[in-house]
Amino acid sequence: MYEVKIITTFAAAHSLRNYPGNCKNIHGHNWKIEVVMQGNSLDNLGMSIDFRMLKQETESLLHTLDHTYLNDNPPFSAINPTAENMALWLYETLSKRLNSHNTKLSRVCVWENESSSASYYE
C-alpha cells in the first residue's frame, strides 16, 4: 500500500455557537490541512496519485473558505465550524473528487494551531 500526503494552509475566522468560553467570540486561525491518500498500485509514471492534482483539488475547495467567516459558509452555517466538523466535511467532499479504482482518501487532519488538530478517517 502506498500513502501520499499533501499539506496546505488557509486563513479564516470562526466562532463556536453555545461554547462556554472565549471561542464563542469571533477569532481567526491560520489553518493547516493534511490530506492523505492511499493507493494499492502505481501508474505507468510510478505514481499512485499526482501530488499536483491532489494539491489543486484540495486548494480549490479551501479557496471557497479562505479569508471568510466560516460560520457563513455551508455546512458551517448550520453546524459549528470545529476542527472535527471541518475534517469530516473536507473528507466527504474530497472523497467524491479524488477516490478512484486505485486510490482512496485515507485521512484529513485539520490543525487550528501548532499544537491542536483533529482528524477524520473511515
Image (cartoon, helix red, strand yellow):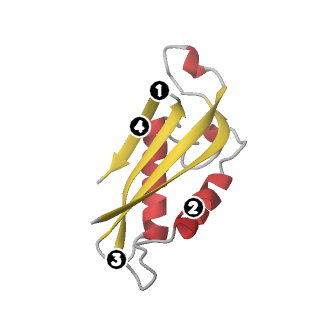
Q: Of the residues shown, which amino acid type is indicated by label 1?
A: Ser
Give the CA distance from mark 4 to mark 3: 26 Å
Q: Of the residues shown, which amino acid type is indicated by label 3?
A: Asn
- Residue 6 horizontal/vertical position (percent): 50, 55
Q: Earlier in the sequence, mark 4 or mark 3?
A: 3
Name the residue carrying label 3. Answer: 102
Quarter of the image where one finds residue 44 = bottom left
Tag shown at residue 44: none
**Seen in the image, is 64 located left or right of residue 108?**
right
Q: Give the residue at x 71% y 42%.
A: 68
**Seen in the image, is 71 located left or right of residue 92?**
right
For the residues bearing labels 4 and 2, Cβ distance under 8 angstroms: no
Q: Nearer the viewer, residue 114 or 65?
A: 114
Quarter of the image where one finds residue 49 = bottom left
Q: Of the residues shown, which amino acid type is indicated by label 4?
A: Ala
Q: Earlier in the sequence, mark 1 or mark 3?
A: 3
Give the CA distance from mark 3 to mark 2: 18 Å
Q: Earlier in the sequence, mark 4 or mark 2?
A: 2
Q: Nearer the viewer, residue 121 or 50?
A: 50
Mark in the foreground, 4 or 2: 2
Q: Nearer the viewer, residue 37 or 14?
A: 37
Tag shown at residue 115: 1
